[in-house]
Structure formats: C-alpha cells, structure tokens
Image (cartoon, grey):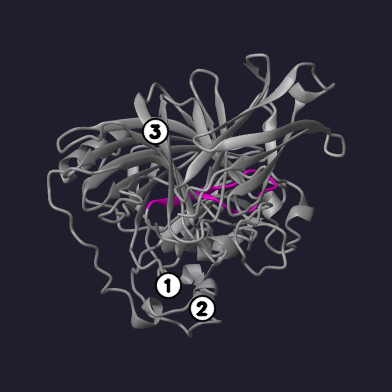
Amino acid sequence: MRADLGVTWRIEARKRQGIGAMGGAAIALALAFALPAPAVAQAFSFDSLRARARELSKRGWEKPRFDDLPEWLAKIDYDGYRKLRFRPEMALWAGDRLPFSAHFLHRGFFFKRRVAISVVDGSEVNELRFSTDQFDYHEVKDSPVLGNLGYAGFALRCHLDRTDRWDEFAVFQGASYFRLVAAGQGYGASARGLAIDTAAPRGEEFPEFVEFWLEKPKPGASALTLYALLDSPSTVGAFRFSITPGTRTAAVVSAFLYPRHGVEKFGLAPLTSMFLLGEARSREIADWRPEVHDSDGLLVAGADGSWLWRPLDNPERSHRVTRLPIESPAGFGLLQRDRNFESYQDLESRFEKRPSYWVEPRGAWGKGAIELVEIPSDLETNDNVVAYWVPEKAPGPGEELAVEYALIAFTHDADKPPLARATSTRVRPGKELQLFVVDFQGAPLAGAPADLQADVAPTRGKVRHVVLQPNEPAGGQRCSFEWLDAAPEPAEIRVTLRQGARPVSETVVIPWGKP
C-alpha cells in the first residue's frame, strides 16, 4: 500500500481555517468557478454514471498524463505544498446561506493528477474552473500563470463543532482515498474506494477517483451527496456518497464495479491507518511517547452475534496478513479505543481524538473474509495498516459487482461490542515461554459475576497458569497466562471471558511470531 499519502493528510488536516463572509465578492466568486455553459445541457444521474463506467470497462485503460503541471509544482516539497492555501472567501456556496461549503486542493507534491469536479444543481451540470484567484501563493511564488490547471481534490465543510465556525468533515484527495471526522475529532485513519491485490505477490494496484460531481444541497439539508468515477488498469467503478456530519459522521457508500480483466483480490470498503507503538511495545523503536497510533485494533462483528477484537501490531521484519473468514459480516472497523491523553502524551498530534471507523454492510455480502495487513514501519508518517473485506468470488470482465455500506466515524459506542471489551494486551516475550496479560472492562463484568472463567485457546503449544482476577483500579478483570511454544512459525491465541458456555466478552485474537 502507498504510505506517502498519509503525510499530507495527517499534518495538513490539523490546520482548520474559517470561511469568511462573502459580502460583495459573490459575483467574483461565481466568475472564478464557472466554466462556459455547454451548448447542450448534459443531464446527470447515478444511472448514467454507472452506464458510463460499464462502457469504459470495455475499453483499454489510459495512463494519466501530468505534462500540464509546471515543473515548480511537480517538484515542490512538502513544506512548500502546505503553503498553497485555498482562500476561505472563495469557498463553493459560500454566499448561498447553505449548510455546506467546499474548499479545493491544489495540484502538486504527491497529488499531480488533475481531477475534474462538477456541480449538479437540478438539471444543470457545470464543471468548476480553476483560477489562481482562489489560492494564496505569496509564500511560494509571485503571481503564477497556471491557466485552467484543475484541482487535486476537495474538502467539505459545515458548522461541525461550533455554529460560528466552519470545520472540515470530509476530504477526498489522492488515488481513491477519503477521510471523515465527527465533532471534536482530528483526522487520523482514512478510507478508500477500492483496494486491488493488496499484499498480493504481483503487487498492489491503486485505483483513482478521476472525476467528481457535487450535488448542491438544499437549505437546511443534513446530508451532502456526491458522486465519483473510479478508474484503474483493471477496474472501473461508479460511486455515490451521502455524507451526514455530526457527533457521528456517516457516509452511505454505494459502489458498482466493472472489471476490465481478471483481478486476484478485490478489497471492499478498505480502511487504512497508522500504528507505530502500542502498550505491548513489541518493537524497539526509540520514541519518548508511550503510544503512537491512529487506531489500536480491528473489531469484527459476525452475523451470528460473535465479536472478534484483533489488537494491532507493528511487525518487525515483513508484512503480516491476518485472514478472518466470515460470511455476510455485520460490521468491521479500525477503532481507536484508548481515549486517554496520558497514553500518548502528544500535545500536537492528540491521538486520543482520532476517529474510529466502522463499516456497516447494507444487504448480505455473502461468503468471504476480512483481511488485515500490517506493514513494518519505523515512522509515524507511514500508513502501515489496512483492513478490507474480500468476496469469495471476484467478478470477471463483463460482470458487475454492487456493494453498499455505511462508513461511520465515531468516538464512543457502547454497542461496539455490547460485551466486555479488551482495553489492553501486553506481552513479556521469551525464547520459549511468553507471558500474556489482557485487561477487560465493560458492564457485563460489573459486580464480579459468579462462575466467570477465561477460555484461552492457542492454535498450537501449551497454555498454563491461567489466572483471572479483578482489576480494581481499572474496574474490570485481568486475564494472565503463560504460553509455551518453541516453533518459529506464526501462531494465534484466542481469549474469551465466559459464564458457563455464554461469552460475556469479545474474543481477543492475539497473533504471535515474527514474520
């Protein structure tokens, strides 16, 4: 997977700018954005976008060209790119008294591709026109002449945290990446439209959103709808996003995918995150902070009511791929459970405010598996974790794969899971004998329930000295055990708290071994 995109989003997204009043600039704003109207108005609908995607899949892929990008933008570094600021007063719909507005993102740095962006207003469809008047260049270059350079993406805004300030709640930029935040959050994990052949021997392919349509909202609207055309050497796709920002920001995603040729692995509803250090500190990385991560675990909900929690790790030598077979999952997500500032001690990054992402499938997805890929990393600027769902049978050329789900950004949710949850997993490693300590908290553990026991099940080796005791300072239960195994191959240990045969906690899936 590509780790470079996380650099710009992770740091740049902390900078929130307010949108000023338009006043007499409304006419200039309209002229700055408007392209000449087409001779014949082109109607737009999701059905027409699907038809276009299906037709494009029958043709060969055209490699994007960047020869219209001036050399100084193609070679601009990270610090220079950050200084290409969109002027708040030029925001789309800024003078229309609507609940949403949009800022546009400059091409350059990693984001060289020109992405067409249009506005759908009833029966009218108009492509937006780039203008240097929309950006502040004074820290980078004096009065650049760029023509209709186009944009690299956009950021959506609303009154998310305060009624007197505009805040970002979604960003679409780079390949098929996008991010959501809810009230009180900062950017962290990200999502993608599609993952293709992630961690496959032939190498990963990165589809790209090449064109967008923003639907102009009505006054008082609570959701913003947009559409996207995805393209890659192997696949074309039509996407619709209906995004409702708030204390939980939710995007309902509808996607129709059309392969040009056979694909080894489709990764649907992919989520991407960063994990450098956790409480287990399984790698020797010099860092003054106790923990450094955007997400600390993968949660999977089965249609049968089961819940699995897989703590994230930063493998030392090579990729680790964890495959969890599941039919029609009820949901899955990369969560940031640890919300205590003391766990991170980072006044700038504020990892305790990073969003948890939850994918909630619409309809039955059928047989398949959740895959988690963890990539070794020594830097927090690398997005080194990805999770997605893989259908058992990938569609072939001429076939259509339809998928719909809600992607939810949230901070707390007592129903994920409605059982006791693991709050930390620590390990004292050894050559043959490892000591594991897993802490659980949650309402099902209140009052020290009788007949509580720990079920510890390794894929191999011997478990001994299983101890379950109240963790009074934390208000939960602590399970500790020793695992004896000398084999070098990776293994897995599952830990569940039970009353009789009934689980009262999620099942913690602990990987072991150094891939």
Reading the image, the residue beneath label 3 is 369
Q: Work out whether residue 194 or residue 456 is closer to the camera in this orientation and state it.
A: 456
370 versus 287 height, above or below: above
Amino acid under label 1? Phe
Q: Image point 75% across, 29% down: which residue?
A: 442
The picture quadrant where one finds residue 292 is bottom right
Numbered disc in front, either 3 or 1: 3
410 versus 10 height, above or below: above
- Binning the other alpha carbons within 10 Å of mark 3 as few (below 14), some (14 to 19) or many (20 upward) gives many
Q: For the C terminus, give its image quadrant.
A: bottom left
Left or right, residue 148 beside residue 463 = left
Any part of residue 379 in sight: yes
Q: Report the span colored magenta.
A: 176-190
Q: CA distance from mark 3 to mark 2?
A: 42 Å
The picture quadrant where one finds residue 508 is top right
Residue 295 drawn at (x, y percent): 60, 48
Amino acid under label 3? Ala
Reading the image, the residue beneath label 1 is 109
Q: Secondary structure at mark 2?
A: helix
Question: How many numbered marks have been drawn onto this rendered protein structure?
Answer: 3
Please report contact status of discs 1 and 2: CB closer than 8 Å, yes or no: yes
Q: Earlier in the sequence, mark 1 or mark 2?
A: 2
- Binning the other alpha carbons within 10 Å of mark 1 as few (below 14), some (14 to 19) or many (20 upward) gives some
Residue 113 drawn at (x, y percent): 33, 64
Q: Secondary structure at mark 1?
A: loop
Any part of residue 358 in sight: no
493 versus 78 height, above or below: above
Q: Secondary structure at mark 3?
A: strand
Residue 219 drawn at (x, y percent): 56, 37
